Image (tube, rainbow, N blue to C red):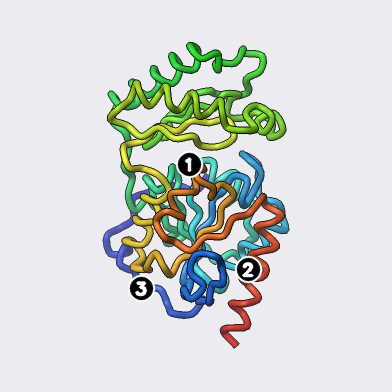
Amino acid sequence: MPVVFRLPSHALSSTRAWPQHGRLNYTGQVNQHAQIRMVAFDLDDTLAESKSPLEESMARTLADLLAVCPVCIISGGQFEQFDTQLLANLPPDTNLDALHLMPTCGTRYLRFYEGLWHEVYAHDLSHAQKLAATEALENCAKRLGLWEPDDLVSGPRIEDRGSQITYSALGQQAAVDDKKAWDPDGSKRERLRAAVAKELPDLEVRAGGSTSIDVTRRGIDKAYGMTSLSRQTGIGLDQMLFIGDRLMPGGNDYPVAELGVPCHAVTGPADTQTYVRGLINELTADGE
């Protein structure tokens, strides 16, 4: 895994001065006149299947996009997940200087500088908040009958991600098909989310992936991350394009749409790849 350090203060200013190339006229449903200077993606079920590595063709597509436009990946996962799913599978010629990483919904922000990934900031939960979240998730899941038997669970159920505590009903390493089958209509997650939220009035409780519940500080969601990204880069929210699979009301990508960021909904990695190939063609044509 790449070593993570604090980004030196003299390097921080360089993240704000992006060239004007790499724009495109977005023709999506939110703002057809927006000039897009950065493309942001969800990770699981958008760029890759849940907790699975990028397919080789998707990795190539993402590298081609990074050659012409800055890209941000924002997801509820921690940096280690970004490393194994994303970074380890990108082609050697990928322009990492143009890649922005926002684990745990933007409560952490990392940039590539002098051959290493560096933390620009990290907004972690306190020890007391982590303890309260862990206890509430376990107690509520057991009370609602959503604490699955050990033989159905693969990997840790509750994970401390620093700035986020995540409950995964089938464990972090559960098979993708098992995750999709566990709660297809989202009703289990909503019951658990509502119960945990009552126990943690001072924290934010949201449904995350297909089997997960995330607990963060209040006001922490992908809209928070996108707002932080705009502040760090100097790129306006109306000049960004967000691509995700859960942009419907109640989905964990929906706060980005509510924020007014131009968005494009996808059904999975294959749909994403087709759409991004079209963006690359438009960017390339626009630059000629």
Task: Estimate the x, y position of residue 78 in percent, counting from the top left.
Answer: 47, 40
Dot 1 corresponds to which residue? 76
Dot 2 corresponds to which residue? 64
At 32% from the left and 49% from the top, the residue drawn is: 121
Instruction: Please name the amino acid that badge 3 sits on.
Output: Ala
Secondary structure of the residue carrying numbered label 1: loop
Is 108 situated left or right of 74 in this image? left
Which quadrant of the figure contains the C terminus?
bottom right
Work out how far the residue at label 2 is from the one at label 1, CA to CA, in angstroms. Answer: 25 Å
Dot 3 corresponds to which residue? 17
Instruction: Please name the amino acid that badge 1 sits on.
Output: Gly
Is 228 situated left or right of 285 in this image? left
At 68% from the left and 60% from the top, the residue drawn is: 273
Q: Quadrant of residue 81?
A: top right
Q: Earlier in the sequence, mark 2 or mark 1?
A: 2
Work out how far the residue at label 3 is from the one at label 1, CA to CA, in angstroms. Answer: 27 Å
Q: Nearer the viewer, mark 3 or mark 1?
A: 1
